Image: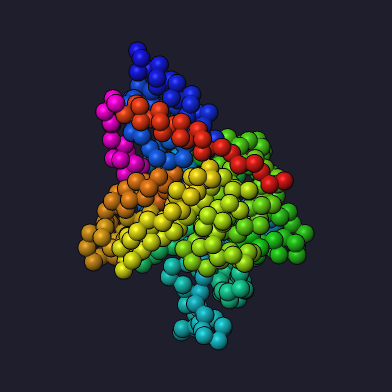
Amino acid sequence: MKLHAISAALCALAAAAAPLCTQAASPDFVSAMPAKVWNTLSGDAPIVIGHRGASGYRPEHTLEGYALAIAQGANYIEPDLVMTKDGELIARHEPLLARVDLNSDGSIKMVGGAPVLNRTDSSTNVWQPAKYADRLTVKTVDGVKTAGWFAEDFTAAEIRNDIRAQERLRDLRLGNNAYNNQFVIPTLQEVINLAKAKTLETGRVIGIYPETKHPSYFKNFTDANGLQRMEDKLIATLHANYGNDHNAPVFIQSFEVHNLEYINGKTDIKIIQLLNGSGNPFDDGRSYAELASAAGLDSIKTYADGVGSNTNLMISLVGGKLGAPTQLIANAHQRGLAVHGWTFRAENVFLPNEFDSSADPAAYGDLTGQIKAFVDLGMDGLFTDQPDLGVAAVAALSAVPEPQTYALMLGGLVGVLSLARRQKRAS
Ligand SMILES: [Ca+2]
Ligand SMILES: [Ca+2]
């Protein structure tokens, strides 16, 4: 009886202390007490984000891939967003519906009279129908010359009628090619509809984690064509579906800085600044390394609720293996910022080499081992291409502690109370 009273008190404390928490303390949580003490910002288990869906098993950014991620237990599904010619937001990783290779002089590489398909950046069949052959073009995206078929050169109706998803990693995830040319390219609204329907169906809150892709590039496009800005379209869609609610099960993410500051001025929905392992945001002079520093995080906390970090910024990679942890997670938590890491993938080619199972790049290694290293540091969430393995890894780390751990839990939650304060918004 006392345990249940303590549980209830802990849950109330956790709820008060955890503005980022989107999962209310469930009856399961209470009855399963004692539970593991997590050193996340909220004190809850890390969230599992289906990276572009369940990309290890289905072509990315399809309703079928997102649905599989949800069935596998993902808490969030992640649509990357680009725009069509008529201003619709659709889920694709890049404006490129398919990409072709360039010669060193910047012209399109041709072999046997045909353009050479890029084997890792082509996620649809747009390169196949003869009717769209003349839409192949070269553009400059964020300063980089790029060739292919671009979403903003197609209407939403053309994409719906003629374009179907293909496996992006067509030479690595060979089994997924069996699903090519079957699945439509979903709109943001369709992704939201899926998340809401699955929330009702499963009784679990299924969140969405939309990313604005190349916001400066798309702002030029919308300005030139008299269309609604990508950020405004996104916010309007989110508010229509979730309200202007900080506790909506939504995170908005971007690699750029100033579009997130703009978004922060227009919504209370949670915001995540993405941090890459190298380089700098296209719209900001600071490097990602500077943004990941204590001073950078001081700046980020004025407009965001957390960071989406390349794994290498949390634990450096030395000789292909995990090296020493950095202070990123500790520094972020000190500032009330959550840290969601990317990208956790089971294939040996992506894993730090100590977790490889063999020399076969496509074979699965020890993803759980890799995830454990980051969760031990307090990482608050993980983007994974294999949501089933991500969920299993978090479950495996949820070891049931001894009853005396209640005292530690109380201490931990008091600590969380002092940390997890929503930073005042920049006006
Ligand atoms: Ca993304
Ligand atoms: Ca490896």
Q: Quadrant of the N terminus?
A: top left
117 horizontally vs 361: left or right: right
Residue 327 visible in this rendered orientation of the protein: yes
With respect to residue 139, does 201 lie above or below?
above
Q: Position of residue 342 (x, y in %)?
A: 43, 54
Residue projecting furthest to the top: 1
**At 31% from the left edge and 36% from the top edge, which residue is drawn?**
398
Q: Is residue 237 above or below residue 22?
A: below
- Colour scheme of the picture: rainbow
Q: Is residue 58 visible?
A: no
Taking the image as shown, residue 37 lies to the left or right of residue 216, namely left
As drawn, the residue found furthest toward the bottom would be 105
Furthest-right residue in this view = 226
Q: Position of residue 426 (x, y in %)?
A: 68, 47
Looking at this view, is 197 or 204 the one in front? 204
Query: Which portion, as a residue range, is magenta?
Result: 387-404
Q: Position of residue 417 (x, y in %)?
A: 50, 33
What x and y, as percent, mark residue 68?
41, 44
Residue located 71% across and 65% down the image: 220
Please name whichever residue, 273 or 140, is drawn nearer the observer in this view of the structure. 273
Give me the residue at 38% from left, 47% from top: 377
Residue 153 lies in the magenta-colored region: no
Residue drawn 50% across the image and 48% down it = 332
Residue 14 horizontal side relative to residue 262, left or right: left
For the residue pair 416 and 109, the one nearer the viewer reads as 416
